Amino acid sequence: MRIDLLSPASFAAGQPHDQYRWLREHAPVYWHEEPAGRGFWAVTRYEDVWTVDRDFQTYSSEPTIMIADPSEGQNGGGFGPYKMMLMMDPPEHAGFRKLIRSEFTLPSARLRGERIAALARQIVDAVAARGECDFVADVAGEMPSFVIAELMGLPLDDGRELYKLTEAIHTAPEAQAPGAGGAAVAKMFEYAAGLIAEKRARPKGDLASKLLAAELDGRRLEDPEFMLFFLLLVDAGGDTTRNLLAGGLLALMDAPEQLAWLKADLDARLPAAREELLRWTSPVIYMRRTAKHDAELAGSQIRAGDKVVMYFGAANRDPARFDAPETLDLARQSEGHLAFGAGPHVCLGQHIARIEIDAMLREVLTRMDHFELAAPPEWLPSNFISGPRSMPLRFRAI
Ligand code: HEM
């Protein structure tokens, strides 16, 4: 089996489940060469991914969670001395996470439920009568951009523009114009700088205003710290949710009997189905850690400084954890899947994501029917985030 978990080509039609399967069976902690780097350990079994993600004392999120090492003089997830909380370890990480945690609890997420349901209706209203759409751009992508705009207190159109930038940030450099990813980050920061001025002058009840007023160890956030928070939130909640929705619908179209089962009692079956679609699609392909000291992982000797990369989609199809994992089974108990990660960095937005997913699936599946691809879906050329970036669809309005 040729193993290549770096080339975006390996992810050009979804995740490379044949490679994952081989790795789990033959080399669950596999030394992966890296043409432009020093190589890394690819971890593909459920139990090992679970262990690495939770053991922050051995496996650090610093300096970066991306496979590529930061270039000389740069840090991996920020600029100057500043970094994103995704790339921090406890206890520093906990202080930052605490600043926004209350906005993301289950009760807070539920308070947004009605508004999210109304947005879902509005999104489907705009396409239902047309009988065709690009499901990614017109439906799946609309929801996360609206939600981030609402959270941050921005105009909805700005949410849409920012969200386009996240796609450029997640696309592999070799699959787009040189510098496009960096330019997108720069635009995001420029927007965040404008937002700081606006929200300081006219604070409201939104998360951006709250973050600017919040205190961390008795001081306010510095502008670059706010900007990195902003980038993280826009980035983390954008094409992840979009890809779950688009990849999820694609999976349902491939399994019509499953789709029919779900629709036969949508309200009761949606929670289990949503978790199974999360397990199945695993939109975040990997997170990297860096070993702080020598350690043994499933028989492999990890050395201090080694890069250790967790493949969530591979862990989520580990037969040691899930029965018949390569079968989509919406009725299964998929709890414990690792699509949202685990440990101190476990997805902060997971409750909001679940509410978004449920609202969109409910709206789509009760108002649209007879889905048919109008052209083959095109996948995001990325080894980091997985999902279709366009999915032309014909359907019937119900
Ligand atoms: C289907 C949708 C989503 C998926 C699959 C997903 C997945 C993930 C994963 C795998 C991580 C890293 C966990 C780890 O390292 O163990 C993460 C972190 C994070 N996610 Fe999500 N996410 C989704 C939606 C969202 C949404 C909607 C938001 C916010 C509105 C969000 C905000 C975050 C943040 C802030 C972090 C960083 C947490 C930290 O560093 O402490 N995510 N997410």
Image (cartoon, rainbow, N blue to C red):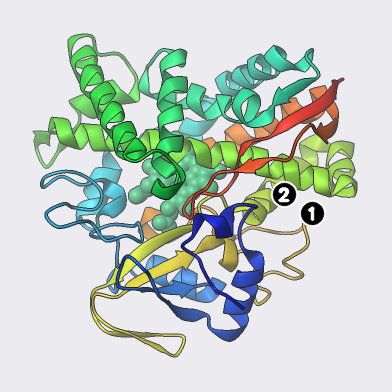
On the picture, is 252 further left or further right than 350? right
Quarter of the image that includes the N terminus: bottom right
CB within 8 Å, label 2 to label 1: yes
Q: Position of residue 387 (x, y in %)?
A: 59, 45
On the picture, is 340 further left or further right than 219? right
Quarter of the image that includes the C terminus: top right
- The front one of 30 and 326 is 30
Dot 2 alpha-carbon crowd within 10 angstroms: few under 14, some 14 to 19, many 20 or more: some
Image quarter for residue 288?
A: bottom left
The residue at 23%/12% (across/down) is 198
The residue at 63%/58% (across/down) is 335
Q: Would you name the residue on which mark 1 appears?
A: 331
Image mark for residue 272 = 2
Tell me if residue 79 can be seen.
yes
Q: What's under tag 1, amino acid-wise?
A: Ala
Q: How many marks?
A: 2
Tell me if residue 106 can be seen.
no
Kind of element beneath mark 2: helix
Kind of element beneath mark 1: loop
Q: Position of residue 16 (x, y in %)?
A: 61, 63
Q: Position of residue 358 (x, y in %)?
A: 66, 35
The residue at 27%/48% (across/down) is 85
The vertical placement of 135 against 254, above or below, is: above
- The front one of 224 and 108 is 224
On the picture, is 239 further left or further right than 100? right
Please tell me which of labels 2 and 1 falls first in the chain: 2
Image quarter for residue 51?
A: bottom left
The vertical placement of 13 against 271, above or below, is: below
Image quarter for residue 69?
A: bottom left
Q: What's under tag 2, amino acid-wise?
A: Ala
On the picture, is 131 further left or further right than 227? right
